Amino acid sequence: MMQTLTKEQFISKISDIERVCLVSIHDGKVYLRADIEKGGDNGLRIEMMDFEMNTSYGFYEANSLCRSNYSGGISFIEYSSYVEAEHRAINDFLDLNPHSALLYCDDNELYELTDKYPADTDLYVAVN
């Protein structure tokens, strides 16, 4: 069910902010580059990293597992208020790499990215 979307379609498909990520494909591997997390002092924050994901898991579990395998290495964009975070987080997140493809996927489609997209590709993914 993997679909390429426009920015507006991508935003409309987001049902859980924590199921959106920016990934990179390099040398047949998928790397988690950024996501949005509920947390921090003001509700939402953008977290940026460079962690290899285990593609034998779905997106959600691979995201959690790869983050637990690394100590440190995460930088943040945080906001001064919850209202500001709600207003800006999605667009700031999508501005991290504005020329990347925008995908809507089922959770179990992580392993397909390396087959469907060439090396050195960055992709935004909203997971169903």
Image (cartoon, rainbow, N blue to C red):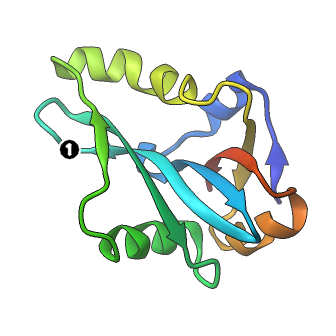
According to the picture, the residue beneath numbered tag 1 turns out to be 39
Left or right relative to 37: residue 98:
right
Farthest residue to the front: give it: 27
Residue shown at the point (37%, 15%) measured from the top left: 87
Total numbered badges shown on the rendered structure: 1
In which quadrant of the rendered image does the C terminus lie?
A: bottom right
Across and down, in percent, residue 96 comes to 54, 29
Residue shown at the point (47%, 46%) measured from the top left: 34
Residue shown at the point (24%, 28%) measured from the top left: 78
Left or right relative to 56: residue 67:
left
Helix, strand or loop at label 1? It is loop
Across and down, in percent, residue 108 comes to 67, 73
Above or below for 61 versus 81: below
Hey, which quadrant is residue 41 in on the image?
A: top left
Q: Residues within 10 Å of mark 1 (few under 14, many from 20)?
A: few
Above or below for 112 versus 122: below
Farthest residue to the bottom: give it: 56
Residue shown at the point (40%, 76%) measured from the top left: 65
Disc 1 marks which amino acid? Gly
Across and down, in percent, residue 93 comes to 49, 30
Across and down, in percent, residue 61 comes to 47, 74
Left or right relative to 5: residue 128:
left
Hey, which quadrant is residue 102 in on the image?
A: top right
